[in-house]
Image (spheres, rainbow, N blue to C red):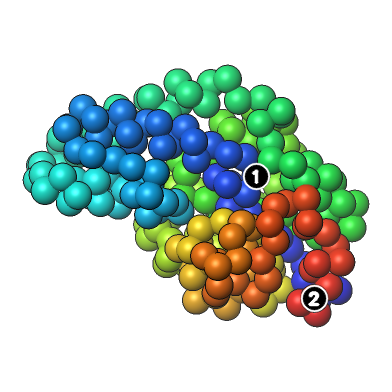
Amino acid sequence: MKIRACIFDMDGVIVDTAKFHFKAWQRLADSLSIPFTETQNEQLKGVSRVDSLEKILTWGNIQLNNQKKLELMELKNKWYLDYVEGVDPSEMLPGVADFLKELKENDIKIALGSSSKNSILILEKLGIMHYFSAIIDGNKIHLSKPNPEVFLKGASDLGLKPDQCVVFEDAISGVEAAKDGGFHCVGVGNEDILQKADVVIESMKQASLELLKRFN
């Protein structure tokens, strides 16, 4: 098989921690008297913490100094971590555990490509850390999606070229990052939204080795 590895986004692909991000950002926006809806939250998917805060401040027409921005990001992350403290393997999205096991049994390498800075904590809570040969997250990148840096570093850590890897993404910015980086991409979610992906599946329950063979 030409495909040697799969690189996974985390939020919305492996686990639905997006709901915790939404609650934390909404709480922060409320504290600044900035209206924040689920529609606006969609624009933050796959985006770094810094860029997410900047978007929210722009929506509220608020300007702050860098020190205050750092304080707000730390506060948001504290609230987020409070929410994820109760995460356990039951929070893993359907189909993920079976697919990771299938990949491992067939010597397909596995990597994480996420803008989250809490990825290791979450993978440990889910009990799947041992599957991953490389973890590239917000602590290791300078540029957030749609820049392909996170996936390019993942492929590099695995010793592979982008066209030997398939990226699984649920966000528009992540799909664009994968395609701009020269990767194959499976969109997870709504086909109308993830049009730029090579293939779109409704959920990870449809992920399989047979799916990967489409890229050979």
Q: Can you say which quadrant of the picture contains the C terminus?
A: bottom right
Disc ID at residue 72: none
Quarter-wise, where is residue 57 in the image? Answer: top left
Q: Can you say which quadrant of the picture contains the N terminus?
A: bottom right
| Residue 135 in the figure: left or right of residue 116 | right
Q: Nearer the viewer, residue 132 or 21?
A: 21
Q: Nearer the viewer, residue 191 or 196?
A: 191
Q: For marks 1 and 2, give the CA distance.
A: 22 Å
Label 1: how many residues lie within 10 Å, few (<14), some (14-19) or many (20+)?
many
Would you place residue 87 above or below residue 213 in this image? above
Q: Position of residue 45 (x, y in %)?
A: 44, 51
The residue that label 1 is drawn on is 14
Q: Position of residue 132 (x, y in %)?
A: 70, 47
- SS for tag 1? loop
Q: Tell me which amino acid carries mark 1.
A: Ile
Query: How many tags in the picture?
Result: 2
Identity of the residue drawn at 37% across and 54% down: 43
| Residue 115 in the figure: left or right of residue 94 | left
Identity of the residue drawn at 15% across and 45% down: 60
Residue 24 appears anywhere in the view: yes
The residue that label 2 is drawn on is 214
- The earlier-in-sequence mark between 1 and 2 is 1
Q: Position of residue 118 (x, y in %)?
A: 49, 36
